[in-house]
Amino acid sequence: KPSIGNREVESVGLRRCRRMVTTVGYQGVPGAYSEAASIEAFAAAGIASIDARGFNTFEDVFVALSSGEIEYGAVPVENTLGGSIHGNYDLLLRFHGCVHILGEYTLRVRHTLLALPGVKMSDIKKAMSHPQALAQTENYLRNAKITPVAAYDTAGSAKHVKEEGLRDTAAIASMHAASVHGLEVLDYGIEDDTNNFTRFLILSRLPCDMAARPTAPAKTSIVFTPHLNEAGALFKALSCFAMRDINLSKIESRPHRPDALGAGAPGDGRPAKRARAAEGLSPTANFQYTFYVDLLVNSSEERAQHALRHLREMCSNVSVLGCYPLAGVLLSEPPPPVPAAAPAHVANPATARASRLRVAIVGFGTFGQFLAKRWVQRGHEVYAHSRTDYSGSAAAMGVMWVADVDGIAQAKPDVLVVSTSILSFEKVLRSLPDAVVANALVVDVLSVKAHAKQAMIEALPPTADILCTHPMFGPDSGRHGWHGLPCVYDRVRITDYHRAARALGLFEDEGCQMVKMGCELHDELAASTQFVTHLTGRLLAKLQLRASPIATQGFKALMQLVDNTCRDSFDLFFALYSHNPNSNDMMDQFGAAFAELRRELSKGQPLTPGACGMRVSRAVAGMEPSATVAISDLAIELKRQGKPGLSLSGGE
């Protein structure tokens, strides 16, 4: 039992059997983003079920944790859009000594428009939420002609809409709030800026033992107060880390309160202390500052110990708030063992960010293995099936191999990813048993989308949800991570929005740039980008270009394009052409552009033997095109503009 002050506090949650539910405190009401973060963070750490308890204020969470009312706390400390939550940094200082950091968890904030069951989008006139959520969806609400209404918090807005039966008002809250309060999702991902993440700290009464994990990526949070009125004090303090190659991931300054350190800690049998105003004192200005710093180092390392010792020599106070896994949570008690049916591979808790999903991949070729490897590293449970036996490759990366497609149904996957070639996609889709696809969320990853959409609508039962995706990267471009790489998606037919959101999280959690786009628009744009790229590379390959000692950078770039496109199979190039009608139009435009450029080059000039195989006179070369040619050119131009028409040449 660790001693806190003169009182012993027993950590009930770290000693009792895991069959009892772990209690985690957060600020807010059920359905809040903080509750969702609590559930996801502990699921990633191996605890599938928790008792999440909401409190009115962040201070209430700290008081309940330090007094033993709850075992853990989850509090936000910074948001990519809103910045730091300064009050929680102050609370970490006030409750230093009785509250310790066990880890961190980053939650992707996806705002969702929620309404009463049966309410349609056309019925909504107002949207209620926290002012920050309203600011983050301002453009969406303006375009939808919906009036924003400020409320106390996001989940509270959902609760208010439900309890008051407001049929003309929607709530902007989390997907989790929809399931908690019995609301339906009208739209998902309505935030104006997709770079919306909140970092939470997981707190406990016992510190995290990172000394036993010296090789694991770690973060150490400290707070220090330099000596007052000393020139270069901050520079000297930071040099303690710079000279030892210790990287800083965050630095934050706050006005210093000399009596704040440990002021909230309980002692002598008394309850935890709450903040109160000073009595009988005249206020005076004292702008001394305390600095909160996150170090990317394990505090048990020798260089970290020397740096902290050096720092204490030049500061009036240095305190370590916690040393914990980088982007993970390490509980003082190991999580329950992985079930026997799960893959033997267990992800590093420092890399697990989202709640665990069971993902089945049909088609375990190069791209299927590329996806599976990344998802296993994130702690997801992955199953695979393919016509070719890849059981050895699957076992090496921690994937459960399923030899018979019927075995996928026994795995009961949350998500079924079909990762076959474009040419075989429909055939494979129709071969899947009803037991596998009925009530499943089926996801494709093809480069053509309208074909995939239509094939799934026709082949799958109406009870199956359909999500079309196109991760626009592969093993080469994504070998160093997926951050910033585009992933296009279209929710074609979704009844379980929460499940679909978790499926998209497979890409969102990797930092992909998520692009919501209809399948038809995707194919139109892909024809003028992806297909043109492949077409240009294939055309240049026909010229059999060779490297040259006088090659320009532009020529080298063309040679690289030839290499990249020809490295892909011709079947892929053919599929991009045959399964996207826009590609045929692009071929016509390509031919018309080449003919037009050729005319511009040859007009009024004698043709060389290389142009048509014979020499002609200047008079012939300068002749105007015939009426037949003009009509043909007109037909090509009209087709390029997308206008309907029928063109017949002589003899047709």
Image (cartoon, grey):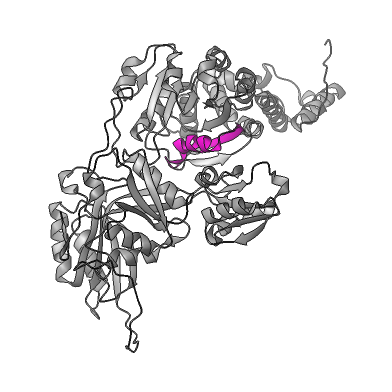
- Residue 75 visible in the snapshot: yes
Q: Is residue 147 above or below residue 187?
A: below
Q: Residue at x 52, y 58 (%)?
A: 153
In this picture, residue 320 sits left or right of residue 484? left
Magenta-colored span: 488-511
Q: Residue at x 33, y 22 (%)?
A: 341
Location of residue 652 with respect to 28 vertically, above or below: above
Give the vertical position of 82 relative to 513 (above or below): below
Q: Is residue 454 magenta?
A: no
Q: How many tags in the picture?
A: 0
> In the image, residue 393 lies at what x, y percent?
33, 19
- In-image side of 86 versus 248 (left or right): right
- Residue appearing at x 15%, y 56% in the figure: 2
* Quadrant assignment for the C terminus: top right
> Seen from this angle, which residue lies furthest right?
627
Of the pair 615 and 390, the residue shown nearer to us: 390
Between 242 and 157, the residue placed more toward the observer is 157
* Residue located 58% across and 18% down the image: 574
Quarter of image, res 258: bottom left
> Does the magenta run of residues contain 502?
yes
Tell which of 286 and 58 is nearer to you: 58
Percent coordinates x, y for residue 304 in the rendering = 17, 56
Is residue 599 or residue 8 the one in the foreground?
A: 8
Q: Position of residue 175 (x, y in %)?
A: 52, 44
